[in-house]
Image: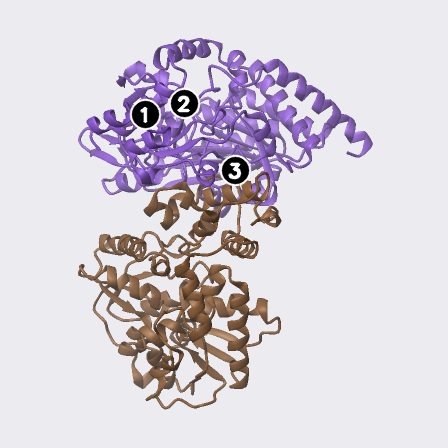
Amino acid sequence: MSNTDIETTITQTPEKATIIEMLKGVVGEERVSDSELERVVYSGDPAVLPQYHYRWKRKYLADYAVRVESEEEIEGILKIAREHNIPVVPRGGASSCMSSSSPSRGGISLDLKPMNKILEINKKGMFVRVEPGVTFEGLANSLDKENLTLGIYPSSAKSAVIGGWIACGGRGGIGTPFYGGLKDHILSLSVIGGDGEVKLLEGDDIDILLHSYGILGVIFEIKLKVHENVREYKSFSYGFRTTDELCNAMVEITKLEVKPIYLKIADDELQKFSNPLEIGKYVLSVTYVDTPSDIPLEDLKSITGKYDGVYISDEFSKKEWDLRYDAEFNPKEHTETLMFQEFWMPVEKVSKMLSKYESYRRSHRIPALWFGMLGSHNEMRLELMAMIDAAQYLKFISSKGILHKMMKRAIKLGGGPYTIGLQNSIYMSRAYPARLTEMQEAKKKWDPNGIMNPDRVTSCLTSFRRIDVLFLLATAFRRLSKYVGG
Amino acid sequence: MNIDNLSEILRNCGSCNYCRDTCPMYIELKSELDSPGGKLRALRAYATKMRNPPIELLQRLYCADCRRCEAICPAGVPVTTIWHDAKKQLLKTGAEMTESLQKVLDWIEKEGTPFIGYESDDRTLWAEDLKLPPESNTAIFSGCMGSFWYPDQPETVVDMLHKLNVNAGYVPSEVCCGLFNYWAGDDEGFEKVVRKNYEMFKKAGVDHIVTGCGGCYGTLAEHYPHIIPDFDIKILHTVEVLADMVRNGVLTFEELEGSYTYHDSCHLGRALGIYEPPREIIKAIPGLEFVEMKNSRESSNCCGGFLSVLDPDLAESVGRRRVAEAEELGVDGIITTCVSCYKNLSYNARETKLKVIQLDELILDKARSSQVGG
């Protein structure tokens, strides 16, 4: 469909054409739906399942599901949304766990995944141009044929897409400690703002789109730096008896000159669902690019030995690397809700977080488990989880409360939420006040009508105080329930 | 219409969407409504907080039955079982399947095959000149594909078993194994065909069944015992029998020049875990260079064959993708063990230089008869 056709269609008055007809006019009959079934499907992401979240949101079902395939179609849809004040929720892989792409006020769920073309692989210039819906696997397969790699990808790479990872910040993933985060890889971004303006962002201007969660506009093209491919990796896993020993070793390993591709820590509760621990109670698994001179083997031995870490086995270590996409999700097989919160923490402070969570595990009888993945040279994505049945409301809400307490602690320690989305927007003013101001200014400029992914980052559905009181009460009841057998 | 009783079986899906980009339906149709994760999300919503699922939900549950979603799921969600239970429940509580699918099931009831236009009297034409014994404890189950569309396939099995000095017979009154009934959620129809076949097997004194069809094999081995708790007939796929003979040195082959890849059938591979036996046979053929596909074994991509019942165009697109994967390897051909895979792959490879070969046929052609008797 040409631009003129789109213009003609969307300038019809609502009397002559309903919203659905206008949307169909932009993308065609097949790629728009207002059926309840399709709206249910396009309103969910991994965070949406517990009933609790449905109650919390205002209007959790989208009014329309629209699949776009081009820049022109995005422009056309945004124009309709502006003119009729309809919220637009950009949707990539829908793999974020903090309700980044599920509606809170209905509106249009804008599926960008069909925009999955690799537009150019330039081996000479060592860059690639892609559409936002390209999956990491799809990109890896295409680059591999040219002996190239992006080198970095989120642990949800089996479902995440490039555009979505940019919107979520792309700071911590597999490969990021070695190659740098997504910020270091984006050469340019083409974006349509909520106001309809098409922008090409380069250099520092790109920063505003990182962690923007679709509240400013829709990314439609990305130019990324690529690297020579790496064929082999070598992994090493060590068991530890205490979290202090584990964290001390982890901090020292992160300070070595050679950085790993992947560094993970976890407790035995998480491990038992994927790669059960045979030695120790906690595991540190680290993977390096397999160039003999680049693996600091002697340093690893010396550091882990100093903290009584014991090498587990080659087989265990390899399995850890093989399970890098799955380990966080494996416990889901055994629980109705795998509740978790993700923190972005300085590595030196991880120990304090874990010792506190371990004490909550004991004092509040939480079915706790945890996992951490090094994201940069000195910061870690720490994921604290609890295996809960949402039907047991007190246990559910009080476990949420404990994760809320952990977030307050993380902020005090110099960390904050890893993903913002709908759920963690209440923490913006405390964890990232400067960024909040910057985003509020950008929101006014980029999306003056306020149609883009509302209730995230710059505003939220509830207040920190309200949540704080709710969770405080819930955790107090939970603690009491320990003494009355609840 | 409701699915309220399914909430327990749906509890483990975390909506991670890992299954989405491996699903042939999603890859072709690009709608989350056709992805396993999207459908699970909808089922869970209608099984818990919403009521009255729309009729379209049932129709979306009919898919390629490739089980790729189950293989990639990090939470072990039993997707195939969920699809079956949901279809069954929706049908029981008032949903109706599409007219075309209902016609297929009606034809199975009438003529014992899902292939409309084919009649039960013609089912055993393939066996007429083969002088098979009327009764034998080992029966060849030719399946609907083998009986009506590719009679060479059961004939090949007969020849092969004769060369191996196995005096195999067949069951003249066999009907469709019931795979389509099971897949459609038609449990009543499924039970009918299971009981009918089992009665005939018993009457003929069968204690071993050999089949060359992955779909029949899976249905007989996996689902018949659910209907007949004391089901005591040993089900074998031809590749299991033949791989055993290769292992023991009983079966050797003449040379075959060329490079070939192997396409794992979904029903034989992911459903039943049979990955190695066909590879052992292929690798035992001298001169043949075996090249593994990038997506193989648990990660093998579907050929789309099963989709031809639902949507022939979709089946063709899925088949073309799989053929393209083989073409990228630069091999001379694709070997497969499943008649349905053979049909769809050979059709979609018609404009390429690739040869598509049924493993049974290859064995018959290249087996050294001196080594296997006969």
Amino acid type, mark 3: Glu
Residue at numbered disc 2: A86
Can you give x and y, in whole percent of width and height, for residue B241 in the image?
42, 75
Q: Nearer the viewer, mark 1 or mark 3?
A: 1
Helix, strand or loop at disc 3? loop
Q: Which chain is purple?
A: A
Count of number-bearing discs: 3
Q: Residue at point 24% right, 31% down?
A: A128
Report the front residue among B204 and A341: B204
Q: Which residue is mark 1?
A: A219
Name the foreground residue: B293 vs A404: A404
Question: Which of the chains bears the disc numbered 2?
Answer: A
Left or right: residue A10 compared with residue A342: left
Q: Which residue is mark 3?
A: A328
Which color is chain B depicted in? brown
Quarter of the image for residue B124 reads bottom left
Q: Position of residue B48 (x, y in %)?
A: 59, 41
Q: Earlier in the sequence, mark 1 or mark 3?
A: 1
